[in-house]
Image (cartoon, coloured by chain):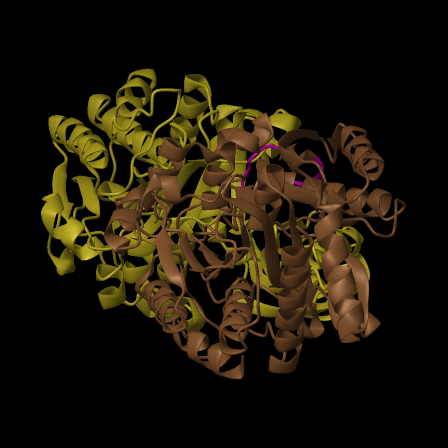
Chain colours: A yellow, B brown
């Protein structure tokens, strides 16, 4: 595991501890090459599908049974860390290597898989290829954001002349559509991932047994003022949209803090017009993202937003739904295999939910799916200080191996 | 005047009541062409200097005396109005036309002048050519922002391949350096301008007799948090720089509102990093611009900033001076001519200060200078609803004419 972490961290090394490894970039192709090389070395069969997802499969003793797949991604956000996504790939590699090395008997074919473009950092949206592959099974309002043709036409955020479809063609990893993950040839999916939050570390737990991906809402809050000159407009005449936005933001904190203590909410993005230091802002918009397992708490959040004051410091206040998603519960049987595996290994653990989105959450609409979490140092992720020790990563891979073998034995 | 307003409003017409007429753009060259054509028609002599400032001069009966100049600009901000700047040019044209038509006797040469690039909207900074022409007379901290070579190298905000120097060469208006406005050949400068604020309208006054340009400070307020994932970080673990910034912004309002009621302050510009809806912001910076005639009030503002809490919602708070300028008082004798002219014409009026910057404020460091204001409907400016009626514009031009003639007679 330590060797894999060191090797993979070189592909896209940003020079100060983290990586920038956009999907299908030269750096991501290096990581894919490393995966293919090592998987071929243990005798795995390599396939790719039309979204360049890669499947490395070790044949089982009853190869006509459906496969068990372990999947994650090898792309990163800009200046991301060395664990988000790639840990699940490295863990799956460890599992197949252990099975091959130790000649562990298994009935089903077992597959290690790399999802293409989970982050969507260069070609939006995030979770692009799981959105395409699982499209038939997704709820309508999510489904429409992942139409295959639209994804191929997705423009690079760095160069609008380049599309994801072109990157796919040029990658050398584009394969046949019939190789796509599906619920006839595959019976279960596992994903090992870092927690990306501080809960396991704070609770001094080795492993998080993931039960669901939190439901969430994303709204835009809009504040309308009037642009006037900073030097010539007496204070009582002003309709300052940024001051209005600051007051609304404080209002939301005050009201949301009265709700369930497990609720998380974030105002991460703000847009101010005209955003010139000598002009009073006439329009400010900010995002609010709120997540909780229980729909009734999410409903309370929506009510807080709907009941915001309609006018603040003479500025009109309004809102718009950007998107929402329901809580996705993982498969109880698979969660059970993970729990048994952790308990048998004697690792400290707790049930946990996933606040972040993962390809596994789209796969869960198509087939039985679950996840395993390992701790994130100081809770940091999507940034260079992201860290999980080689020992913790190995514990995660061990849980993954044993859970997969339980699934293999049981079915 | 009505004809001039209609004609000039076509050059850069943005299609919904206002204009976009960047300095030296094709639209600005049309406005310059109109000025030159009409000034030649009344027998004025046209000169330009090396910053493409245009001077149209009617000879006086004692042409060896120094000139009296009336100056403003014909460029606009993006989606600006039809009065900011160009009114001072049209007013100066009206004055020279009246003098020529009515053969009004005058000793001194009288000049109507167009300053190049007052707004600095395409090639920053604002007040660029007055900053260059008056450079030797400016305070050191202002002077350094207007070094001639640096201004020529100023890049277009729309196309970094294009510089102001190139636009100057291509304009057809670049003339000799010896034609620059100076305090040997010119003895006084007047600028007619719209108020750009609501004070005259609210007080039901026709004319503002301008006495000074307000002193101001511009600071950057900086709030440092920690980036973490929006879905995986429990609320008590967060250091949210945007929430911190909202609290600091409210603090500044609370404290500054306790100071003098004439104080104006603006938080017009905000920058949030990484500004992604799923990430807790780790850095937010916003501007604060504060203006008041009296240095002791500005000093109180600086104390409020210096005494801000050093930490808010676990985020470090800091500040940085962007720039400051002292109050610039206009020439008492010239202000007197304006006051006498208004009183004789019987227009309602009041003393007023300028919260906005103007080329006149740099000229004031080099030679006796003053300004005349007319009302702005609803106080709007730097936006398309900017409006001053033809009658009000004409009243401003009448004051300009009579003040210039008083200056001519007195010296």
Residues B123 and B55: in front is: B55
* Quadrant hosting residue B384: bottom right
Image coordinates of residue B148 in percent, x first then y, are 40, 34
Image coordinates of residue A54 in percent, x first then y, are 19, 44
Image coordinates of residue B219 in percent, x first then y, are 66, 36
Image coordinates of residue A244 in percent, x first then y, are 72, 59
Residues B379 and A218: in front is: B379
**A203 on left or right of B308:** left
- Based on the picture, tell me whether residue B228 belongs to the magenta stretch: yes
Please say if B405 is above or below B277: below
- The answer to whether any part of residue A152 appears in the image is yes
Determine the residue located farthest toward the front in the rendered image. Answer: B61
- The answer to whether any part of residue A228 appears in the image is no
Write down the region rendered in magenta.
B224-236
Residues A337 and B309: in front is: B309
Please say if B17 is above or below A281: below
């Amino acid at each position: 595991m330590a060797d894999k972490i060191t090797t993979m961290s070189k592909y896209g090394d940003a020079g100060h501890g983290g990586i920038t490894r956009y999907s299908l970039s030269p750096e991501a192709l290096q990581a894919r090459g490393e995966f293919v090389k090592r998987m071929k070395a243990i005798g795995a069969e390599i396939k790719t599908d039309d979204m360049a997802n890669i499947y490395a499969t070790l044949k089982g003793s009853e190869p006509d049974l459906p496969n068990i797949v372990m999947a994650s991604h090898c792309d990163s956000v800009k200046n991301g860390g060395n664990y988000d996504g790639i840990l699940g790939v490295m863990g799956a590699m460890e599992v197949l290597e252990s099975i091959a090395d130790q000649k562990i008997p298994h009935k089903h074919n077992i597959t290690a898989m790399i999802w293409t473009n989970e982050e969507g950092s260069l070609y939006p949206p995030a979770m692009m290829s799981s959105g395409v592959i699982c499209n038939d099974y997704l709820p309508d309002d999510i489904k429409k954001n992942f139409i295959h043709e639209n994804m191929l036409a997705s423009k690079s955020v760095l160069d609008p002349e380049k599309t994801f479809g072109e990157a796919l063609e040029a990658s050398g990893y584009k394969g046949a559509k019939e190789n796509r993950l599906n619920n006839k040839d595959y019976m279960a999916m596992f994903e090992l991932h870092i927690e990306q939050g501080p809960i396991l570390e704070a609770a001094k737990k080795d492993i998080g047994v993931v039960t669901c991906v939190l439901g969430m809402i994303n709204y835009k809050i809009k504040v309308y003022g009037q642009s006037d000159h900073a030097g010539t407009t007496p204070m009582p005449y002003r309709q300052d949209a940024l001051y209005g936005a600051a007051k609304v933001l404080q209002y939301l904190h005050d009201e949301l803090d009265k709700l369930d203590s497990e609720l998380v909410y974030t105002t991460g993005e703000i847009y101010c017009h005209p955003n010139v230091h000598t002009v009073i802002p006439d329009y400010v918009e900010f995002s609010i993202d709120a997540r909780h397992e229980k729909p009734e708490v999410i409903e309370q959040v929506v009510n807080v937003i709907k009941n915001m004051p309609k006018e603040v410091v003479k500025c009109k206040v309004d809102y718009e739904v950007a998107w929402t998603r329901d809580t996705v519960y993982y498969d109880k049987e698979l969660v059970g295999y993970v729990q048994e595996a952790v308990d048998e290994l004697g690792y400290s653990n707790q049930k946990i939910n996933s606040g972040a989105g993962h390809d596994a959450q789209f796969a869960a609409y198509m087939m039985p799916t679950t996840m395993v979490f390992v701790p994130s140092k100081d809770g940091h992720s999507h940034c260079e200080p992201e860290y999980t020790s080689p020992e913790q990563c190995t514990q995660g891979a061990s849980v993954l191996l044993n859970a997969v073998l339980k699934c293999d034995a049981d079915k």
